[in-house]
Structure formats: structure tokens, C-alpha cells
Image (spheres, rainbow, N blue to C red):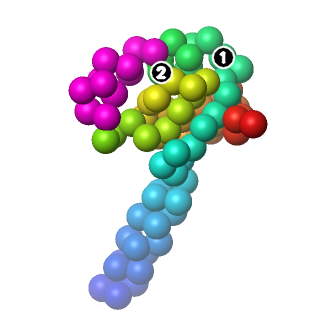
């Protein structure tokens, strides 16, 4: 039973990590709301640049925001 719990936990964790946008992901937004959120993160990214490794319309931002934008259907991969 304990081995099954570990396997299940590892599977869930792996799925969650695979769902995140990876470092360097660049997207183009179709929503002004997401552009505004990316601009709002600029001061944060200026201070904690290591946490902002993705780009939304050329604005350096967190990969979690990029993932949320893509997942909601408001962003597409940048050309």
C-alpha cells in the first residue's frame, strides 16, 4: 500500500511539473488583461529576475503567468 501511495504521489508531481511553461517560453497575448498583468510584474521581475524567465509580448514575466494565459486560451506561441 505504501508503494502505491509513493507511485501515485510521484505521478501527480510529475504531471504538475510537466504542465508548467518552461524557461524561455515566449507567447503572444490576445487579451489586454494578461498584458496588463505582465506589465504589473515588471517591478517584481526587476528585483527578482531569476523568477521571471518567460516572455509575454516581449515583456519578461513569470512562467506561471504565461502558463495561465496559454491554459485559458488567451495566448499563443510567439512566432
Q: Residue at (46%, 67%) from the top-left corner? A: 14
Q: Which residue is mark 2?
A: 38
> Quarter of the image containing the N terminus?
bottom left
Q: Which residues are magenta?
A: 39-49
CB contact under 8 Å: marks 2 and 1: no
73 and 35: which one is in front? 35
Determine whether 32 is above or below 66 in the image.
above
Quadrant in the rendering for residue 42: top left
> Quarter of the image containing the C terminus?
top right
Q: Which residue is mark 1?
A: 31
Q: Is residue 18 left or right of residue 77?
A: left
23 and 32: which one is in front? 23
Question: Was residue 77 drawn as part of the magenta stretch in this picture?
Answer: no
Element class at badge 1: loop
Q: Residue at (30%, 85%) from the top-left corner? A: 2
Q: CA distance from mark 2 to mark 1?
A: 11 Å
Q: Residue at (51%, 51%) from the top-left corner? A: 22
Q: Residue 33's spot in the image, x, y percent? A: 57, 13
Front: mark 2 or 1:
2
Q: Residue at (52%, 60%) from the top-left corner? A: 18
- Ranked by sequence position, the earlier of labels 2 and 1 is 1
Q: Residue 44's spot in the image, x, y percent? A: 30, 24
Q: Residue 48's spot in the image, x, y percent? A: 26, 33
Q: Residue 19's spot in the image, x, y percent? A: 54, 53
Question: Was residue 44 drawn as part of the magenta stretch in this picture?
Answer: yes
Q: Give the main secondary structure of the magenta stretch.
A: helix
How crowded pointer 2 is (Cα within 10 Å; few <14, some 14-19, many 20+) is rated as many
Amino acid at each position: 500500500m505504501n508503494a502505491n501511495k509513493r507511485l501515485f504521489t510521484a505521478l501527480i508531481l510529475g504531471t504538475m511539473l510537466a504542465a508548467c511553461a518552461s524557461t524561455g517560453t515566449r507567447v503572444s497575448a490576445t487579451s489586454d488583461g494578461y498584458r496588463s498583468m505582465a506589465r504589473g510584474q515588471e517591478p517584481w521581475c526587476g528585483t527578482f529576475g531569476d523568477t521571471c524567465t518567460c516572455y509575454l509580448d516581449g515583456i519578461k514575466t513569470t512562467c506561471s503567468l504565461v502558463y495561465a494565459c496559454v491554459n485559458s486560451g488567451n495566448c499563443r506561441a510567439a512566432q
